[in-house]
Image (cartoon, grey):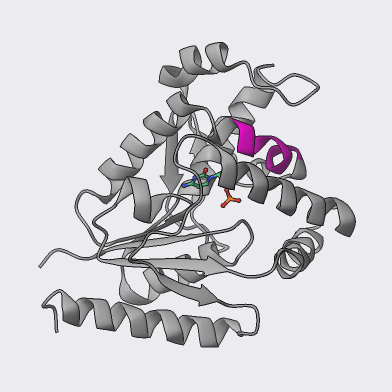
Amino acid sequence: MKGLIIAIDGYSSSGKSTMARRLAATVGYRYIDSGAMYRAVALYALDHGMIAADGSVDTAALTAALPDIHIDFAPAGADGRQHTLLNGADVERDIRSLRVSEHVSPVAAVPEVRHALVAMQQALGAEGGIVMDGRDIGTTVFPDADLKIFVNAPARTRAERRYAEMLAGGAKADFDEVLANVQARDRIDETRAESPLRRAADAVDLDNSGMTLDEQDAWLLGQFHEALRAHGHN
Ligand code: DC
């Protein structure tokens, strides 16, 4: 029987990628981080001078370049993480930089970028057996997903997590800047015209602010087994 399609959406730094990756590893599904794909496009746009000093995106140039932007995922490396490849180069570290974080939301708001990436995401999930996280997975990419989760936590909690992650990764960071970035991204993600961040009507909500990783994993695995039963897998 073909595997389920699991959509995990939510605000930035809500911990949804970690949850999604760990569930996929536990149940033997493929994990796709759709945010990494938007980040890779933003990195390309930055490196090709398509983002002005004021942050505005040269939409025409970026749209014309889309056929030249190839995104793949390399199998998990020594760090256990899947690495994002942009035109064959491993950009996993670069796409997590503050430079990319600061410019990705306007790139993700460009309708042509979304159409191209949504089509890729749908192709990646066509066979089922996938856990995908993002902002519009349960609403636009897989509106018929077998299980939809919507993750949220207060902006300050999410900024604290992101800040700790950056310090742990050896990056320099200023907490107020990180918090401002989280809040700015929330605003852009919620208000863009093309598939804004929105909870699917049939999503299960999770506020994970008071939960440990193990508690989150157990909760999500419980949801997964319930979804399996609901879809006739035992
Ligand atoms: O989850 P993340 O922070 O890595 O996402 C990076 C950016 O991409 C963020 O601004 C939201 C956007 N994004 C999106 O618009 N749709 C998705 N499915 C995933 C991410």
Asked if residue 90 is positioned above or below residue 138 in the image, the reply reads above
Numbered circles on residues, count: 0
Name the chief secondary structure element in magenta: helix
In the figure, is residue 29 to the left or right of 47?
Answer: left
Asked if residue 39 is positioned above or below residue 116 in the image, the reply reads below
In the figure, is residue 191 to the left or right of 218?
Answer: right
Give the x, y percent position of residue 201.
36, 62
Q: Residue at x 63, y 37 (%)?
A: 104
Asked if residue 121 is positioned above or below residue 207 in the image, the reply reads above
Q: Residue at x 37, y 67 (%)?
A: 203
Q: Residue at x 25, y 76 (%)?
A: 227
Give the x, y percent position of residue 52.
75, 19
Give residue 6's quadrant in the image. bottom left
For the N terminus, the image quarter is bottom left
Asked if residue 194 is positioned above or below residue 83 in the image, the reply reads above
Give the x, y percent position of residue 100.
69, 38
Residue 90 seen in the current view: no
Residue 116 seen in the current view: yes
Q: Is residue 101 magenta?
A: yes
Give the x, y percent position of residue 66.
45, 20
In the figure, is residue 147 to the left or right of 100?
Answer: left
For the C terminus, the image quarter is bottom left
Q: Residue at x 81, y 51 (%)?
A: 180
Nearest the viewer among 195 and 160 is 195
Nearest the viewer among 14 and 73 is 14
Magenta segment: 99-106
Nearest the viewer among 33 and 71 is 33
